[in-house]
């Protein structure tokens, strides 16, 4: 046996996103890339902002002595200070560099957070639909996830959330704007959620951390203002990346930010720094840290994604699809016209359109579309999407 039984089983349950992406490669080889419309992977086709290239040119022409050497495990002081300044402006709280840990993307950040918080048998509460890797991340560190289903608007069912918290609950993990639904958790949702967390902390005599996975925080539409979790629960931690807001997914650069008003802030940060090292990340990549230190106020043109959202939402609803209009990120999560979402994704695949079934996000009966793609791919997919739903009318 080459690999462990656990990993073998996890691979069988594994990512539908990657499965559909790989099937897309095979279809493109068969039919030609221009004849296959792959909406499965959230891999932005947009290039980083021009400011990124300016900073890259500047540092390549005037390299800093020792810039590629090891650094403190938490990351470069100047980068953490830049992140802290940006968060202070956004939240009204007083962040300092020592409240920030630079990480290898949001995935690395979440693993560091879970490693720091979890003892064997501890749980994180998560909300469907969710990014499937959450389950694997928790298992990496001896924990597990308890899933709370959504209401009809993809917001948490608060009664089930309340019942899901027990003496083993160590954290509550949210993702807003959400992958795959694009739904944003607003003020009312976060207020009720934080109230329940505080009630349960008192009931069980435990500490529960509210953790926010927010790589789409700056990709929000319709003039909506982002509600930061730091203003709702003192034991709060953000795990994020610049993969989406700067279109840098391959650079694997993100950070963890701990609420400066957290009662255990110093101990938590010491644990995060230790785990960043001992998980083998050691520190986030040096070169990209130097660059993002100067890019905290920079994002891609969010208006491009908003136009794609508006175009695709109208096209899908005109065809008869039922879906919630996304408020952020670059995904849509329509209801499958048949309960068997895998069957419907196969129907779409027969029309050379690739999407991800909802069960890949813990919520069967739906499917995810990524629209962080070129217009030709989005427009080319409409014929297949229309043919597929017409078979169920």
Image (cartoon, helix red, strand yellow):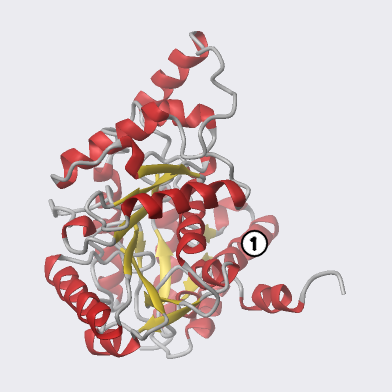
Taking the image as shown, residue 14 lies to the left or right of residue 371, namely: right
Taking the image as shown, residue 187 lies to the left or right of residue 236, namely: left
Residue drawn where x is 76% and y is 79% of the image: 5
Q: Secondary structure at mark 1?
A: helix
Visible in this render: residue 12? yes
Which quarter of the picture shows residue 290?
top left
The C terminus lies in which quarter of the figure? Answer: bottom left
Which of the pair 50/218 is nearer the observer? 218
67 shown above or below 250? above
Residue drawn where x is 41% and y is 45% of the image: 255
Q: Position of residue 380 (x, y in %)?
A: 44, 57
On the image, numbered disc 1 is attached to which residue?
22
Residue drawn where x is 50% and y is 13% of the image: 64
55 shown above or below 25? above
Visible in this render: residue 214? no
Which quarter of the picture shows residue 195?
bottom left
Q: Position of residue 292 (x, y in %)?
A: 39, 31
Q: Position of residue 148 (x, y in %)?
A: 35, 83
Taking the image as shown, residue 371 lies to the left or right of residue 191, namely: right
175 shown above or below 284? below
Q: Position of residue 308 (x, y in %)?
A: 30, 53
The N terminus lies in which quarter of the figure? Answer: bottom right
Circle 1 residues within 10 Å: few <14, some 14–19, many ≥20: few
Which of the pair 30/61 is nearer the observer? 61
């Amino acid at each position: 046996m080459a690999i462990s039984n656990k990993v073998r089983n996890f691979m069988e349950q594994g990512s539908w996103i990657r499965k559909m992406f790989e099937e897309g490669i095979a279809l493109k080889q068969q039919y030609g890339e221009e004849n296959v419309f792959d909406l499965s992977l959230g891999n932005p086709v947009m290039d980083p902002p021009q400011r990124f290239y300016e900073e890259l040119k500047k540092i390549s022409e005037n390299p800093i002595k020792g810039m590629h050497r090891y650094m403190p495990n938490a990351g470069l002081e100047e980068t953490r200070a830049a992140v802290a300044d940006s968060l202070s402006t956004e939240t009204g709280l007083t962040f300092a560099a020592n409240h920030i840990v630079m990480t290898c993307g949001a995935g690395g950040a979440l693993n560091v957070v879970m490693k720091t918080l979890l003892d064997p048998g501890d749980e994180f509460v998560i909300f469907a639909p969710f990014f499937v890797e959450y389950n694997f991340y928790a298992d990496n560190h001896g924990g597990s996830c308890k899933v709370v289903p959504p209401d009809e608007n993809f917001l948490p069912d608060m009664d089930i959330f309340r019942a899901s918290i027990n003496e083993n609950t160590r954290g509550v993990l949210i993702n807003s704007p959400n992958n795959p639904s694009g739904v944003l958790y607003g003020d009312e949702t976060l207020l009720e959620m934080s109230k329940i967390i505080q009630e349960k902390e008192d009931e069980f005599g435990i500490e529960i951390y509210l953790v926010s996975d927010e790589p789409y925080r700056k990709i929000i539409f319709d003039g909506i203002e982002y509600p930061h979790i730091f203003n709702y629960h003192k034991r709060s931690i953000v795990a994020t990346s610049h993969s989406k807001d700067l279109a840098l997914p391959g650079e694997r650069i993100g950070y963890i930010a701990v609420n400066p008003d957290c009662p255990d802030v110093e101990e938590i940060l010491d644990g995060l720094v230790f785990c960043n090292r001992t998980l083998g990340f050691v520190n986030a990549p040096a070169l990209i840290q130097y660059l993002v230190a100067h890019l905290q106020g920079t994002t891609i043109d969010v208006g491009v994604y908003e136009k794609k959202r508006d175009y695709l939402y109208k096209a899908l609803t005109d065809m008869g699809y039922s879906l919630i209009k996304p408020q952020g990120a670059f995904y849509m999560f329509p209801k499958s016209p048949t309960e068997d979402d895998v069957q419907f994704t196969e129907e779409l695949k027969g029309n050379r359109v690739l999407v991800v079934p909802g069960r890949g996000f813990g919520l069967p009966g739906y499917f995810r579309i990524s629209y962080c793609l070129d217009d030709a791919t989005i427009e080319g997919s409409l014929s297949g999407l229309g043919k597929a739903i017409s078979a169920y009318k």
